Image (spheres, rainbow, N blue to C red):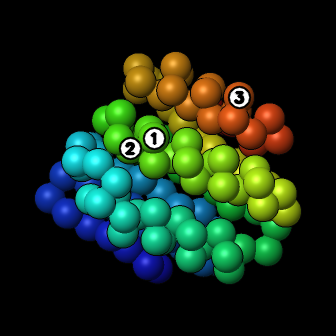
Amino acid sequence: MNEIAAEDYRVGYTPETGEVSFHGTLRLNGTEEYAPIVDLLDMVASSSQEKLSLNLQALDFLNSSGINMLSKFVIKMRQRGDLQIVVRGSRQIPWQGKSLKNLKRLMPSLELLFD
């Protein structure tokens, strides 16, 4: 497993399942602080066969910089065109209902699943 961890959050990739899981609270400041997560997502996308799963069910908070980071990643994958993205969210976490729907607008083929 490849993992980025700090006091408030953890982002990990499990190659066996092709899933990137997000946990905790992501309140990083701007593009520079999100760069390690973007690098992880890019690495996973370049090594994924056909499908990439982003599990956000345990991500309690994501600030606007983080939403921007995810949006840019989804747009990049849409332009690439050969990767199916599945985003898993939680109905119990208020920000996810609104914000994750926007990812589907950016990439209509994206599969959005709520628990």
Which label number is shown at residue 66? Answer: 2
- Specify whether residue 71 is in view: yes
Query: What amino acid type should be assigned to the residue bearing mark 2?
Result: Gly
Query: Mark 3, residues whose alpha carbon is within 10 Å: few (<14), some, or many (≥20)?
Result: few
Instruction: Name the secondary structure under disc 2.
Output: helix
Query: Mark 2, residues whose alpha carbon is within 10 Å: few (<14), some, or many (≥20)?
Result: many
Q: Which residue is mark 1?
A: 68
The answer to whether marks 1 and 2 mark residues whose Cβ atoms lie closer than 8 Å is yes
x and y percent of residue 82 in the render? 85, 62
Q: Which residue is mark 3?
A: 105
Question: Which of 87/57 is in front?
Answer: 87
- Residue lying furthest left in this view? 7
Question: Which of 50/75 is in front?
Answer: 75
- Specify whether residue 111 is in view: no
C-alpha span from label 1 to label 2: 5 Å
Query: What amino acid type should be assigned to the residue bearing mark 1?
Result: Asn
